[in-house]
Image (cartoon, rainbow, N blue to C red):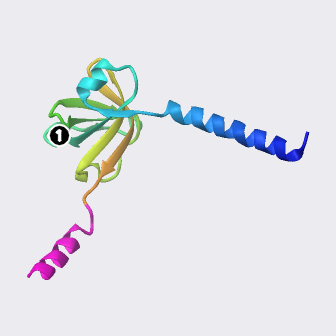
Amino acid sequence: MKRIYLIAGIMVAIAILLFVNSGKDMTTYGSFADATSSTKKIKIVGKLAKDKPMVYDPAKDPNHFSFFIKDTKGEEHKVVLLKAKPQDFEMSEQIVVTGRMKEGVFVATDLLMKCPSKYKDEEIAIKSKQNG
């Protein structure tokens, strides 16, 4: 067997493995209502409910952080993040949590935050100078 056929065969096998593995991590965006009716992981976009309590005690359990978010449809639920509390969490404008609903609580394994831009004030000043 020629060396080029062997290399090509290995590359095809690697490509197939990558394609199969990428399909396992496909999560869809939805709401708390979608998460309640689904057994798969789901991503929920929402805003932090700042009037509700946030509980994080790193001495007791550093990988347990609970808080409340309101999804895009206005439904509010408790979220338990199985990781440490992110820095500047309270300043986030938008939160994306990935996980599943369990017994009325959304258990998240991953979290992404959209924080306010540090350039926002500069951007406003530049636009006002251009317009004025």
Closer-to-camera residue (64/73):
73
Reply above or below: 101 against 62. above
Residue, x 38% and y 19% (percent of image)? Answer: 39
Residue type, label 1: Ala
Residue, x 19% and y 38% (percent of image)? Answer: 72
Question: Residue 4 appears at what percent x and percent y?
Answer: 84, 47
Main SS, magenta region, reads helix
Outermost residue toward the left in this view: 132
Residue, x 27% and y 63% (percent of image)? Answer: 117
Judge whether residue 105 is colored magenta: no
Closer-to-camera residue (126/85):
126
Residue 12, located in which quarter of the rendered image?
A: top right
Image label count: 1
Looking at the rendered image, the quarter that the C terminus falls into is bottom left
Q: Name the residue under label 1.
A: 49
Closer-to-camera residue (83/121):
121
Magenta stretch, residue numbers: 117-132
Question: Residue 56 appears at what percent x and percent y?
Answer: 31, 38
- SS at mark 1? loop
Looking at the rendered image, the quarter that the N terminus falls into is top right
Reply above or below: 115 against 65. below
Question: Residue 131 appears at what percent x and percent y?
Answer: 11, 79
